[in-house]
Amino acid sequence: MSQAEAPADASLPQAPAAAPLFSTLPLDPRLLRAVAESGYASMTPIQAKAIPIVLAGRDVMGAAQTGTGKTAAFTLPLLQRMMRHESTSVSPARHPVRALVLTPTRELADQVAANVKKYAQHTLLRSTVVFGGVDMKPQTEELRKGVEVLTATPGRLLDHIESKTAVLNQVEYVVLDEADRMLDIGFLPDLQRILSYLPKERQTLLFSATFSPEIRRLAASYLQDPVTVEVARPNATATTVEQRFYSVADDDKRAVVRQMLRQRDLTQALVFVNSKLGAARLARAFERDGLKTQALHGDKSQDERLKALAAFKRGDVQLLVATDVAARGLDIADLPGVFNFDVPFNAEDYVHRIGRTGRAGASGLAITLVTRDDARMIGEIERLIRKKIEIEPVDLDDDRPRRPRRRSFDDEREVPEFEARGRDERRGGEGREPRESREPRDAPRRGPAADPFFDRPYEPSGSGAPTWEKGKPGDVAPTPAAPAPAARGGLSPNIRPKKKVASLLGGGRA
């Protein structure tokens, strides 16, 4: 019996089924050519499930682990459906906006637009991107020439709509990419305004790495009988990413990052922090440590952000310190590692952060630095990913000086003699006398000579006690003076009696 005819043994592990090829899809040869030139032959699970449904004209809710190819899952079928609108005419009227892709961040919009242009390079379909932070004039010129595919962020798209440079009355396809992030940063009112300008008859696709109740309500409002495509458990992390959690102090975080870069031989890493100010400061600190570092956060201009990202992708930068503006959708090929310098406030952002590594089946490393104050957020991450998190200690191998432990008041009594002597030397220098030769603490304090006038107890002047005359300078003992005569009426001699003065109205006392 040949090997092909041998019955399969159920006890033996079965080999996984081969991934379907792009060549099996009913796509235009020019699109297949662009896919092959991009280096892709087989489809990811989300692509294999979503592309046939989109080609059939159905609305789709797609959920997949970040980094599994969601962009191609909606770009390729939409381009295929728009091939019937190809035109060689130069008239802008023959190139209206037919597909609109909305993204939450500028970086993601720029990346999606680059993929659209790459897949449509052999066709006559035009595409462009608009986002904030840059001048509107070049974007306006591109829109006036006419484009079929428009990728945009909601805020800048509304600017073009109000300026009447973006006309959306012929849109047939709408894509909401990373929809959960758009809701998180408050884009729901902008989305509702934009969708109100679109025709009612359209195909709507919603893609996201996570599904929440808010996302499902949004889908129920704007999608028509959608098909839900989930290729992984919601909020699951990629299996190709090794996740490690280390317990560290705040002052040791930078040293741990440097040590992990050496131990793991990481040539590049993306370092996430929770604040824009923290990103700028940490980037400068790593620069002082001798690492080529750039910062990426919302306070930088769009030109600075794009240049920093481009330098990181080229390999000119070792560390890219970023806020969560870089947590969604950034596709950095062969990124070996991600550091969570700060544990994210939102547990879902953890899934997106570590999704920047281990993309397209490659292996990656995600290291999270945990302090005592992060216990609540770590618990939220555990509940989200449904996995027990093991926090490991880390031993630093550097020789930098350590900050001494802060002692309380009670600890001062138990300080060993050699430590106390060292402390005294630091306080008073080398010229101070030894501790044994100093006066005890209960010794009387030395002060100026006492003045007998102020040391004498109080005596009333009317009691016949002697008063003191003013002595000459240098006199030690005062000279007693004659007793003052008793005051009339028993009053003190220091009180003056009232004088009788004439009154203008008949006399009397004033």
Image (cartoon, rainbow, N blue to C red):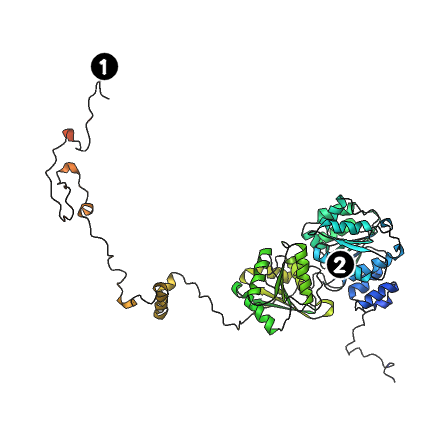
Q: Secondary structure at mark 1?
A: loop
Q: Position of residue 363 (x, y in %)?
A: 69, 71
Nearest to N terminus: mark 1 or mark 2: 2
- Picture quadrant of residue 311: bottom right
Which quadrant does the C terminus fall into?
top left
Q: Using the image, tell me which numbered label, if any, was put on residue 136.
A: none
Which one is in front, 287 or 38? 287
Which quadrant does the N terminus fall into?
bottom right
Q: Position of residue 81 (x, y in %)?
A: 86, 57
How packed is label 2: few (under 14 Cα within 10 Å), some, or many (20 or more)?
Answer: many
Horizontally, residue 254 falls left or right of residue 327, namely left
Task: Reply above or below: 412 against 139.
Answer: below
Q: Residue furthest top?
A: 506
Identify which amino acid the numbered label 2 is placed on.
Answer: Val
Which one is in front, 15 or 222? 222
- Picture quadrant of residue 483: top left
Task: Reply above or below: 450 against 80.
Answer: above
Horizontally, residue 96 falls left or right of residue 308, namely right
Q: Position of residue 234 (x, y in %)?
A: 71, 61
Q: Which residue is mark 1?
A: 506
Task: Reply above or below: 473 against 246.
Answer: above
Identify which amino acid the numbered label 1 is placed on.
Answer: Gly
Q: Which residue is mark 2?
A: 112
